[in-house]
Image: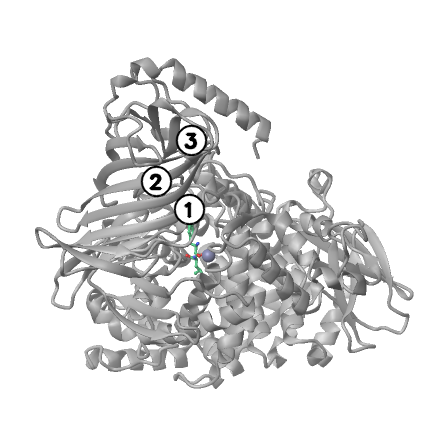
Amino acid sequence: MIPVGLLVLLAVKVFLVGSQTSEQATNPPSSTGEQPPLADGNLSFPWSRLRLPRYIVPLHYHLLLHPNLTTLRFTGSVQIQIDVHNNTNWVVLHSKGLQISKATILDPDLAHVSDQVLPVLHNPSHEQIGIFSPRVLSSGQKYFLYIEFEAELADGFYGFYKSTYRTSEGEIRNLASTHFEPTSARMAFPCFDEPSFKANFSVRIRRSPEYISLSNMPVIKTTPLSGELFEDQFAPSVTMSTYLVAFIVCDFKSVSATTSSGVKVSIYAAPEKWKQTHYALEVAVKMLDFYEEYFNIRYPLPKQDLIAIPDFQVGAMENWGLTTYRETSLLYEPLTSSISDKLWVTMVIGHELAHQWFGNLVTMDWWNDIWLNEGFARYMEYISVEATYPDLQVEEYQLHTCFAAFGLDSLNSSRPISSPAESTTQIEEMFDTVSYDKGACVLHMLRHFLTEEVFQGGTVRYLRKYSYGNANNQDLWDSLSNTCSEDDFTSGKHCYSSDQASKNAYLFAGEHLNLTAMMNTWTLQKGIPLVTVSRKGPRLLLRQNRFLRTVLPSDPQWAAVQQGFLWHIPLTYKTDTSNTIHRHLMTSPTDSIHIGEEVSWVKVNSDMTGYYVVHYADDGWDVIVKLLRENHTALSYKDRTHLIHNAFQLVTAGHLKLTKALELIGYVQLEKHTVPLLEGLGYLQFFYHMTERMDEPLLTMNLGKYILQFFGAVIDQQTWSDSGTVSERRLRSEVLSLACHLEYPPCLERANQLFKDWLHSNGTLNLPTDVAETVFAVGAQDEHGWTSLLNTYKISLSDAQKDKILSALTSSKSKDKLHRLLAMGLEGNVIRSQDLSHLILMISRNARGHHLAWNFVKKNWDTLVEKFQLGSFCIRNIIMGTTGKFSSPEELTDVQQFFETIKEQASQLRATQLALDNVHKNIRWVQRNLESLRIWVNEQMK
Ligand code: BES
Ligand code: ZN
């Protein structure tokens, strides 16, 4: 944060610059986007910071846009009502790639302050423009800034961009859509493009009669203009941030319904995909009803449109009242969408609609706290889907959110949940696993710690208090601490007036708790605590360290990386002597708890509601192994899953022997629950893929045999159908896919038969949706099958099916075919650019495509960055995905050398350091564990 005093000083400086140069201002600089960055004539750009000055505040934008879907250009004008807080001659705001043809400033009566076109200076490196007013704009006054501009519809996925789709007749049609978050509203219109500059937006859009236009609010008036044009006028929006503004011109069709409180919900898609919109409609209506009740705050707009955009970089975007989705995130096609596809659509809608409150109604002050948006939205996916679609059993996958966070947060190059972010690349990079998954996991921990009632009460208080405004972490902790009204303060339980106790006082086990102090250890400090427990008589001894997978306790740098880390850990544990879950808040490096001499086993971190790893020292793991073998149902399925995950994490971090973790999953043969079963299977599968890539044919073969033997019963139980519960269906998908990959003859036979039937039916046979991908993957192994699949890919109207086919195509053993796919992805016609990063990832997962994908990335790096932008999801996924499984020193050197060649960009990216850390971790793993794995597998095969 910039101190207020400094801001005032800066403002004064700017004012001086303006007044000194006012005489020369009659000669406006040329006003195209291609201007030199700074000085122009005698005016120099008045502002040197990345963030805008705070002394001019936008209040209301009147925006007119006219995209031309034939010339693929748009023109526009914006009138922004501004509130001036300091005398100045300059208005500085954002604009990127826009040609500005006119700028004027009008006084409050809409009379010109200056009767001439004003000089506009550009600072492209900061994506800012400065408009010079020869007359001083006075503090305390409101003015209107008026700007006319034009640009091409963007080619990528940001700003006001072009998208296309193909009809079944082969006609290519265009549409224009927006994606602004985090910093691309400035590509569509000049604006104060920071989340705390909230304003109202009145939008008008001009279009030809064959199109419709959509924006955040409903159309209130349509006016015919000359030349076959119509102008749609939208109702003024609520007060909101620029990154949530959206507008679309397209020829899509929709279905609509109304929620119980009267909000009109519509799902839009390309005309021929209209049939796939019905499930989303049902979900969206239910979700809006649910959130209105859960938050006890009305959804404030009269409508919510959800639209499937054919070219979309990420999964979905929460623009207020007009949420945009990738087609696979919104469309559900019963004949080809699997249960996982259905779950995905449900969760994505749950996520974007949660943002209508968390993010849209209350927005983080700045991007450093994007977790307040994304962590909450990710967490609400689970709460909302659990409540609205209990059959989807979404709770079973919540642990994986935390596992995903562990993956990154256990590397030294991780970051705190709240981290500084100034440049656009840094801001983009904030949308990562730490903000989403660690954020959600920490909220999950907090909810369990505070109880559901207090957590919900506090979050609702937060949403109410900061509605239409901005908030930071402290505001959240304060709201969670004050969950009672003033009247309740005296009654005790959770409530204290400020003079009774410190601001964040909380009652926990009879002690006052400072919630801010506790939560700061989770949000301002990176990493994961490792809690080591040991038994000493009746006591459980506890020690906390930082959990790192890259630095082992035996390494010389161990002490240095541990220095200064301490968490306030809400510990929970269960023992064999009672049915209750015990609690203990651990705030110091070491601690102990009385549990009693008679206790035979303790399981710490019950149901993994806490964000920490547990190590059972001495013979602690033997006790656990025995318990799982003899009586695994004494623990919940979440506890069992957690133990498996925990054990393998400890192996990587050098605290536990690989053989112990392998011994632990020996019980999995008894396991009836899908989640721990898949967790155990997942590690074996992971090792299989690893050895396969490392060119260890004998070990790979033996491991494959072992897996088939060990899981034989589960594999043989599976049917090739879509029947059963959601868990059963997901298990089936995973298990059959693995069995066929391991070339289990009965699996191949069945898949080949189904594929043949499918081919003979000319693609009209409906394969069971959950196994279709496996059937396609088996079919894709010969020339005819692969080509037929590619042909179906080209014409299929189901994006769910296309995804399955693409995945199958990438499983080919032919390097030529993999090359061909990459070339098609780069070209972007048959395989859309939006799918390129996923394509690269899938190819790098194929043992034969591993290096091929990485070489492709190195060769086409500049094109990829140009397509997706440096800090984007896609670029980071490409880096992490292609290097993620490297495990040899040669590969590490290769990655290092490549990053050296792109030094300028690499130094701006956290992802490159993470990638190097990760490869380093893999190398250590192989050095330390490969031989044990080999010996262990051989022993099992005896
Ligand atoms: N606000 C994000 C979209 C976004 C992502 C903007 C990255 C800028 C950078 C949206 O709410 C989101 O989180 N999308 C996720 C959706 C998830 C539930 C599938 C995504 O796109 O992956
Ligand atoms: Zn989100």
**In the rendered view, would you say 928 is above or below 581?**
above
Say how the picture is coloured: one colour
Q: Do the residues labelled 3 and 2 touch (CB within 8 Å)?
A: no
**Residue 411 vs residue 580, the one in the foreground:** 580
Percent of width and height locating residue 129: 34, 30
Tell me what residue is drawn at x 71 percent, y 42 percent.
Answer: 562
Write down the residue under mark 2: 80
Mark 1 highlights which residue?
199
- Is residue 917 in sight in this rendering? yes
| SS state under label 1 | loop
Near mark 2 (Cα within 10 A), the count class, few <14, some 14-19 or many ≥20, is many
3 or 1: mark nearer the eye:
1
- Residue 778: mark in rendering: none
In the image, residue 356 sits, relative to residue 563, either above or below, namely below
> In the image, what residue occupies the spot 73% across and 56% down?
569
Return the disc, 1 or 2, that comes first in the chain's sequence: 2
Residue 435 x, y percent position in the rendering: 54, 51
**Split into 4 quadrants, where in the image is the N terminus?**
top right
Considering every residue shown, the one lying at the far left of the view is: 227
On residue 904, the disc is: 3
Q: Can residue 397 be seen in this view?
A: no
Looking at the picture, which amino acid does disc 1 mark? Ala
Q: Residue at x 68, y 40 (%)?
A: 561
- Residues under numbered marks 1 and 2 in contact, where contact means CB atoms less than 8 Å apart: yes
